[in-house]
Amino acid sequence: MTIFRTARGMRDFLPEGAKMMKYIEGKARRVAQLYGYKEIITPVVESYELLAAKAGEEVRSRMYAFKDLGGRKVALRPEFTASVARLVATTLRNEPKPLRLFCVGSLYRYDEPQKGRFREFWQSNYELMGSSKPEGDAEIIMLTNSLMKSVGLKNCVFKVGHVGVLRGILSQENVEEQVQNEIMQLMDKKQYEATLKLVEDAGTSKCLATLKKLMETKGSKVSQILKTMEQQVEGYERAVDAVGNLREILKLVSETGEKIDMIVEAGFARGLEYYTGMIFEVYVPEMDISLGGGGRYDRLIELFGGEPTPAVGVAHGIDRIMMAMQKQKTSLRIEEEKRVMIIPVKEELNREALKISRMLREAGIPVEIEVMGRKMSKALEDADRRNIDYAIIVGEKELKNGAVVIRNLRKREQKTVKIENIIETIKGNKL
């Protein structure tokens, strides 16, 4: 007999794991609400050209791409931003700015499965469209910190940089955009030797010393690192402006009074090609992979046929946040509902059991009915094993008096209660 398993890189989430995922998703939705982001839902399948346009070679090579039955090349979305940008460039193009948009769901990349990296993964995604101001960038950082705090994670560290620093230097040295993209891909993978060789091969050895210094410049003393960066990029006007922009963003964040641990990294790059400004990722000490990241991208919507629209956004890995919570042993702050099992003493009483179950569900009380035909002692054992709070025993003698027996499985106490008083007894914890 064939035993079917999940496809490689895919996972099943059992009830406890699913509960944790939905808990994080709920927190992400609440943060979206608190910051004024409206939820949208975009397709899992998009045009390949759309998703590939500025995804970066690394992502392009790992997309689940295929031809549909109409011969069109499509792909499973590897990230959300391209879909949101398409929507803003078309359907939402005349909406007043700024647009604050939120989405959550599954994404797909054909990566080699490893710790924290799967072929199907989940993200919450926030995009702020229409503002070029540093306040927008600051909001996205603060929003991310709010989410990490809301799920109970501790000791989060933000790694921050600015794409404009490296691209400013390379542009002034007349390095073609495609070569710049290859350089940024190598920087993202921390392949610094290969990066420097590619720069040299591009005939721009003049800036090699500057790039080497930037690669080594990082630290948590934000003002000091930014000052060092300014000195290193002196003479590269766009790079100097980029450092100034980063300083303004981080100053705004610090002036909110929120304590956020930050490391500024001058040689920091992210794999996606569409970034144009500030970029960041968030980490916890227990894991060496980021829980989320994002940054500014001011030209993507225009690329998709929309009006020139500055934008900044972030995506958070829901399953990675779940891993971090498990490593930090973070408990879910959920107010558990009382759960009830209804056990008819004999089969003839099933109709009454179903009527009582309907009454309780209409009152918002989760109810299960014993449907396995077990004897009373076994049915109570099963309810106890599955952490049911109350058992309602439907017996002939009690029913003649319009009552049932309610047993508190935690306290091991029980009493006979009129059917009309069941809801009050359970909700009021009167047993």
Image (tube, helix red, strand yellow):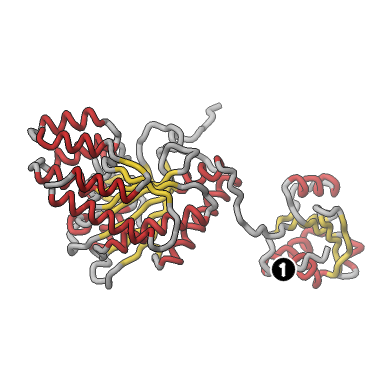
| Quarter that holds the N terminus | top right
Question: To which quarter of the image does residue 205 belong?
Answer: top left
Q: Is residue 243 left or right of residue 116?
A: left
Location of residue 94 in the rendering, given as x and y in whole percent from the top left corner:
24, 71
Q: Amino acid at mark 1?
A: Met
Residue 106 appearing in the image: no
Q: Nearer the viewer, residue 73 or 149?
A: 149
Q: Nearer the viewer, residue 315 or 168?
A: 168
Residue 112 appearing in the image: yes
Q: Is residue 141 left or right of residue 4?
A: left
For this orientation, the residue located farthest to the right is 397
Location of residue 394 in the rendering, given as x and y in whole percent from the top left corner:
83, 60
Location of residue 240 in the rendering, given as x and y in whole percent from the top left corner:
18, 51
Disc 1 crowd rating (10 Å Cα; few below 14, some 14-19, many 20+) is some
Q: Is residue 160 left or right of residue 333?
A: left
Q: Residue at x 18, y 64 (%)?
A: 307
Q: Residue at x 35, y 42 (%)?
A: 219
Q: Residue at x 75, y 47 (%)?
A: 372
- Above or below, comparing residue 397 to residue 183 in the picture: below
User: Helix, strand or loop at disc 1?
Assistant: helix
Q: Residue at x 84, y 54 (%)?
A: 411
Q: Nearer the viewer, residue 120 or 248?
A: 248
| Quarter that holds the C terminus | bottom right
Q: How many marks?
A: 1
Location of residue 158 in the rendering, given as x and y in whole percent from the top left corner:
39, 48
Q: Which residue is mark 1?
A: 359
